[in-house]
Amino acid sequence: MKNKISSQFMTEFIGTALLLAVVTGSGIMGESLAAGNAAVALLGNSIATGCGLYVLISLLGPISGAHFNPVVSLMFWRMGALDVRALYVYLCAQFSGAIAGVWLTHVMFGLPILQQADNARNGVGIWASELVSTLVLLGVIYLGVQYAKDKIAMLVALTVTGGYWFTSSTFFANPAVTIARSLSNTFVGIAPADVLGFIGAQLVAVLIVSLLIKK
């Protein structure tokens, strides 16, 4: 049991760190090559994120389920697929892995490791967007696990890629990602003052899904 918990922790830590490295690194690269065209930067950012998710979920899913996201782990706990101890391990791995991934990306791009974002992302529309984003993501995962388990990596990757473009918040839908991105003053950053609004909307979505799903 201890070995299983350890492997799950490391898998969630490494997977979440690599996910944030893909998100942050592709944002930095996209912005630097887009010559001021935000649409081109976002396109590169979204495609890279979708591709990274597909690979990470495909390879690491058999080990930990490849959650990489506290709201996903909370949903699986509500479904009875995780006990409280495992949930705690997953959350610790995800939050610490996300921050480590951002710091690693700063090192790779020769940027100061410790940063604070100043990208303002707030307002009712943005919060509503995060609520919808998280509901969509959890709905896709829940239905995918039930009816299309062999396609779950593709479903999540395509959902997130599309979500960048149809939501005003660019589809964070992940508390660990939200906190980690507040520590990067780059294209993907979010001002620390706006983090609470995002996470609040994400947790409301979890509550809604928890009331709807059956164990």
Image (tube, rainbow, N blue to C red):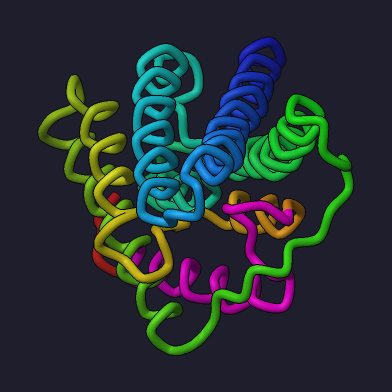
Horizontal side of 162 relative to 43 (left or right) equals left
Q: Residue 157, can we see it?
A: yes
Image spot of residue 135 (x, y percent): 30, 63
Horizontal side of 175 relative to 35 (left or right) equals right
On-image quarter of the N terminus: top right
Which of the pair 66/54 is nearer the observer? 54
Residue 212: name its quadrant.
bottom left
Image spot of residue 166 (x, y percent): 25, 62
- Up the image or down, 137 lies above or below 147; here it is below
Most distant residue in the bottom direction: 124
Tell me which residue sits at (57%, 68%) in the image. 199
- Up the image or down, 194 lies above or below 11; here it is below
- Up the image or down, 38 lies above or below 66; here it is below
Check if residue 64 falls in the magenta segment. no
Check if residue 197 falls in the magenta segment. yes
Tell me which residue sits at (84%, 53%) in the image. 115
Image spot of residue 30 (x, y percent): 50, 40
Tell me which residue sits at (39%, 69%) in the image. 205
Tell me which residue sits at (23%, 34%) in the image. 145
Horizontal side of 212 relative to 188 (left or right) equals left
Total numbered labels:
0
Residue 87: name its quadrant.
top right
Horizontal side of 169 relative to 31 (left or right) equals left
Q: Residue 83, can we see it?
A: no
Most distant residue in the left direction: 147
* Region in magenta: 185-210
Examine the residues drawn in magenta and state their main secondary structure.
helix
